[in-house]
Amino acid sequence: MNKVIGFIGCGNMGGAMIGGIIKASLVTPENIIVGDLNEKKLKKAAERYGVKTTTDNNEVAKNADILILSIKPNSYPAAIKEIKDQVKENVIIVTIAAGKSIKVIEEMFGRKLKVVRVMPNTPALVGEGMAALCPNNKVSKEEIEEVLHIFESFGKGEIVNERLMDVVTSVSGSSPAYVYMFIEAMADAAVLDGMPRSQAYKFAAQAVLGSAKMVLETGRHPGILKDMVCSPGGTTIEAVATLEEKGFRSAVIAAVRSCTKKSREMSE
């Protein structure tokens, strides 16, 4: 990719993206420019990745061919107001803000630009992110692929219709929190039965990691994989029956749908 990638914001997600891009050799470090008001973060990024840094967002906007707004949603209005007259005519704007539709971003810039709305998640920090991408009609197929390659450099990516972005938020963007709660609960039970906490977290987390990998790599339905573990009259089916009795599945479904509902309310 022979383009300059600019970042406004150099927090955890921005850092994960920069690391993934460089590791995958999508562009050289010299072709990445990062803007942030926090000079400590910029120094860390420069030392770790060798990228260009600046405290002037306009410098990033003027140079970037792909501009990634890796800042909090409530910072978008001020940041866009600052840079909107400085961005290149053919720049691709990449947003990662929950609740900010493509239409809202276009209105903030005051004109139609190439916009790709993305919902990533925090496992990007360990190279296992999942991102949903939704481009507007000004983005070409080739440009969509370029942005997709960025997010696939630190996980997986899928193109989705914008109407599904609120669902993506609940099933992917927010869902690591549910999984962490599940791991914590399993570990608490193991500790209750005598296992040291450090071991309990390791066993529980690795079980989740391995199970997820089984779903992705075998392509089998999760229900089939569950049945493979459940021997007749055995320990696993006993645990599954207890989870069903306590409403485990319905609780998860209700939680995910409440998250979708909240995301839709934030988008209105």
Image (spheres, rainbow, N blue to C red):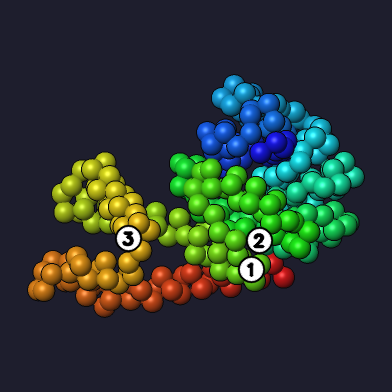
260 is higher (above) or lower (below) than 138: below
Instruction: Report the front residue among 102 and 255.
Output: 102
Asked if residue 184 can be seen in this view, the reply is no
The residue wearing badge 2 is 134
Labels in figure, total: 3
Residue under the image location 60 percent in, 37 percent down: 26
Residue under the image location 22 percent in, 71 percent down: 227
Looking at the rendering, in which quadrant would you find the C terminus? bottom right
3 vs 2, front mark? 3
Return the x and y of residue 136 as percentages of the image width and height.
74, 61
Question: Disc 3 vs disc 2: Cβ atoms closer than 8 Å?
Answer: no
Label 1 SS: loop
The residue wearing badge 3 is 218
Of mark 3 and mark 2, the one earlier in the sequence is 2
Of mark 2 and mark 1, the one earlier in the sequence is 2
How packed is label 1: few (under 14 Cα within 10 Å), some, or many (20 or more)? Answer: few
Picture quadrant where residue 22 is located: top right
Question: Disc 1 vs disc 3: Cβ atoms closer than 8 Å?
Answer: no
218 is higher (above) or lower (below) than 234: above
